[in-house]
Image (tube, coloured by chain):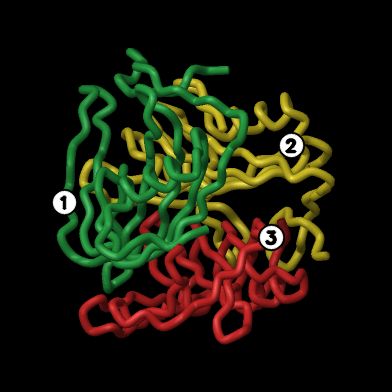
Chain colours: A red, B green, C yellow
């Protein structure tokens, strides 16, 4: 459980944390606040991400994610829910999030190897089924 | 940590996973995307669930839940937050969720027995207090 | 994994749970329903919390938080997403939440000492960086 650096990108910070701790597979939750963010929504029909910019400060009311391998490197997949000063929310796949403050609980899953491979049904890079 | 099957129901998939792994008590988080869902809101006064259908594709931006026993069978209790292409959210108790893609981290809580029993104060099936 | 008491405050209940189990550092997730709540939004510019009262019953669709020490006592930091009967959400830093029903999975992080100290960049009480 660690605090992330002010002004760092959340996704890159967790990828770095995983690398520095030798974590190949893991799961995390985080809370805090972001200065700005870029969210994605996956168009399930056209197999494309749509992007949304969030330019104002928000509470990060939920962040759930995982670490696995993609093309041999630690890959961070995270979804967030953000809230503004009225408690209204915006949410999606987290592409980028500039940290105001963030507390992350990252759990290493030892002995687990999860490698993302292209899945043509969804157009996403997913783990193989057991 | 596993990927669920495309087109399967999330609740049933996790119940099956728990059964196949012999998990009697557990806790999980999940992220992904759903093709459609059925959400519930519990009316605290009238002790009844109201249901909402979500017929369009959404990001599953948060899914938190647990596994325990109800009438001798593994019972999955999950709450979700869903987001549409504008990042707007719909959320509630997950009654049914058709998986587009889903990544689940299920943790077994060994030695724990949690049996749901009817609680007349809330009208819900809850665990006994310690 | 435990059920919290009906009509208790969620934050105080988890602080008590941590105290009674000797948990100095931990992480938790919870789901359930609240009768009412008080949420906070941190104004990143003026370094002040703004408060919002939620006076009606809501599903607690997500609650993510942690336990650490602040001035020698267990301190609970939690963020929630709440949903009403239409599935619409309100979310923020949880200042107070009156439990209708709540299921909490609290994990002790043994050997970890996290002490909150005043951070002048954010105006928040944060853990020291590694």
Question: Do callouts 3 and 1 point to residues on the same chain?
Answer: no
Residue name at image x 61 percent, y 35 percent: B110
Specify the label residue C74 is tagged with: 2
Residue name at image x 42 percent, y 48 percent: B17
Specify the label residue B53 is tagged with: 1
User: Measured along the vertical axis of the image, is residue A118 above or below residue A3?
Assistant: below
Q: Secondary structure at mark 3?
A: loop
Q: Is residue C90 visible?
A: yes
Q: Is residue C103 left or right of residue A5?
A: left
Q: Which residue is mark 3?
A: A110
C-alpha separation, residue under disc 3 versus residue under disc 1 = 39 Å
C-alpha separation, residue under disc 2 versus residue under disc 3 = 30 Å
Residue name at image x 45 percent, y 32 percent: B68
Position of residue A94 measured from the top left corner of the image (x, y, whole percent): 47, 73
Q: Secondary structure at mark 2?
A: strand
User: Measured along the vertical axis of the image, is residue C91 above or below residue A59?
Assistant: above
Q: Are marks 3 and 1 in contact (CB under 8 Å)?
A: no
- Graded by Cα atoms within 10 Å as few (under 14), some (14 to 19) or many (20 or more), the crowding at tag 2 reads many
Position of residue B65 measured from the top left corner of the image (x, y, whole percent): 44, 44
Q: Chain of mark 2?
A: C
- Report the quarter where the N terminus of chain A lies: bottom right
**Quarter of image, res B98:** bottom left
């Amino acid at each position: 459980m660690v605090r992330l650096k002010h002004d760092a990108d959340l996704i890159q910070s967790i990828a770095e944390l995983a690398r520095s701790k030798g974590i190949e597979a893991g799961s995390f939750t985080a809370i805090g606040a972001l200065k700005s963010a870029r969210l994605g929504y996956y168009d399930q029909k056209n197999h494309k991400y749509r992007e949304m910019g969030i330019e104002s400060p928000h509470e990060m009311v939920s962040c759930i994610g995982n670490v696995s391998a993609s093309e041999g490197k630690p890959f961070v997949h995270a979804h967030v829910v953000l809230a503004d000063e009225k408690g209204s929310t915006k949410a999606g796949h987290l592409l980028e999030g500039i940290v105001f403050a963030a507390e992350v609980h990252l759990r290493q899953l030892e002995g687990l190897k999860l490698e993302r491979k292209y899945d043509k049904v969804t157009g996403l890079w997913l783990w193989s089924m057991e």
